[in-house]
Every structure is written in structure tokens, then in C-alpha cells.
């Protein structure tokens, strides 16, 4: 993949991440917290995939995308270590929201997921802009 295509893909994924945050906030405002958790997680996921597009590398499974990002970007402190913990928490909450019929969503947890997604998006935008 050419570097121009990688940059375009990274920017496309950033746009997806922004759209996902907007959706999460709309769902949060109408008290659809499970859906908001899902969209916040996907914002995080697309932000991570924007970083990986610059290598370029990709994986089919979410857990592989997150593991690679943590190993190569969080553990090496390209991104702050605390963000790795926040991503893991967002993933767990998204899975509970999507698959556990008995999961009770707390609005304050959903708000944290949205804030995590916003923070990661900001960090990734800065990273992509430095690389491009």
C-alpha cells in the first residue's frame, strides 16, 4: 500500500471515529446508554485503526487490533499507558452492553466511555498529523 493511500485511510478512519462520537453523544442525550457505549467503543476502535493504517497493518479481530496497539504504541509510550487501561475498560463495557441482557448501564460509566473516546481521538489526530 502506498503511503498516500495509508494516509487517506488513516484520515477516513478518523472521520469514522468522529462520527461514532457524535452518535454516542446523541444516544447519551436521549438516555440510550447501551447504544452510546457501543458507538463510543467504535470511535476508539476506528481511532486505533487510523494509527495502524499508517504502518500499514490490519487485523480481522478486534482483540488483535487492540493487542497490537497496546504492545506497539501504549507499552512503548507513544500513547500514554493509562489509555491502554481505558481502552480495555471501554471494550469490556461495550461487550457487556451489546451481549449481556442483564447488564445495567450506569449513565456516569457511559459518560466516561465517551470522554475516553474523545481523548483518544484527540491524541490520534495529533499523532496522525505529526506523521503526515
Image (cartoon, grey):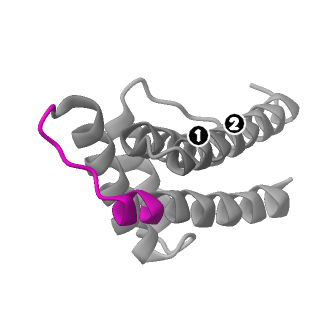
Region rendered in magenta: 101-112
Which residue is label 2 attached to?
A: 13
Q: Is residue 99 above or below residue 48?
A: above
Q: Which of 19 and 12 is in front in this view?
A: 19
Which residue is label 1 attached to?
A: 46
- Where's residue 24, x and y in %? 56, 44
Whether tag 2 and tag 1 are in contact, CB under 8 A, the answer is: yes
Residue that extends furthest to the left in the rendered view of this protein: 102
**Residue drawn at (11%, 38%) of the image:** 102
Q: Which of 8 and 24 is in front in this view?
A: 24
Residue 55 visible, this orientation: no
- Where's residue 32, x and y in %? 43, 40
Which of the marked residues, 2 or 1, is nearer the chain's N terminus? 2
Binning the other alpha carbons within 10 Å of mark 2 as few (below 14), some (14 to 19) or many (20 upward) gives many
- Which quadrant is home to the N terminus? top right
- Where's residue 77, x and y in %? 50, 75
Q: Does the magenta stretch include residue 108?
A: yes
77 sits to left or right of 122: left
Task: Look at the numbered disc 2 and give the secondary structure of its residue.
Answer: helix
14 sits to left or right of 28: right
Residue 19 visible, this orientation: yes
102 sits to left or right of 4: left
Binning the other alpha carbons within 10 Å of mark 1 as few (below 14), some (14 to 19) or many (20 upward) gives many
120 sits to left or right of 104: right
Q: Which of 106 and 95 is in front in this view?
A: 106
Task: Look at the numbered disc 1 and give the secondary structure of its residue.
Answer: helix
**Residue drawn at (73%, 39%) of the image:** 10
Amino acid at each position: 500500500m502506498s503511503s498516500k493511500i495509508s494516509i487517506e485511510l488513516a484520515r477516513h478512519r478518523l472521520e469514522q471515529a468522529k462520527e461514532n462520537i457524535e452518535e454516542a453523544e446523541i444516544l447519551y442525550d436521549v438516555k440510550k446508554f447501551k447504544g452510546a457505549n457501543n458507538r463510543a467503543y467504535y470511535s476508539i476502535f476506528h481511532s486505533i485503526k487510523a494509527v495502524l493504517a499508517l504502518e500499514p497493518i490490519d487485523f480481522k479481530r478486534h482483540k488483535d487490533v487492540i493487542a497490537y496497539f497496546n504492545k506497539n504504541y501504549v507499552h512503548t509510550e507513544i500513547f500514554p499507558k493509562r489509555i491502554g487501561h481505558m481502552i480495555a475498560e471501554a471494550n469490556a463495557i461495550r461487550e457487556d452492553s451489546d451481549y449481556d441482557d442483564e447488564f445495567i448501564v450506569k449513565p456516569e460509566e457511559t459518560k466516561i466511555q465517551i470522554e475516553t473516546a474523545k481523548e483518544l481521538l484527540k491524541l490520534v489526530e495529533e499523532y496522525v498529523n505529526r506523521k503526515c
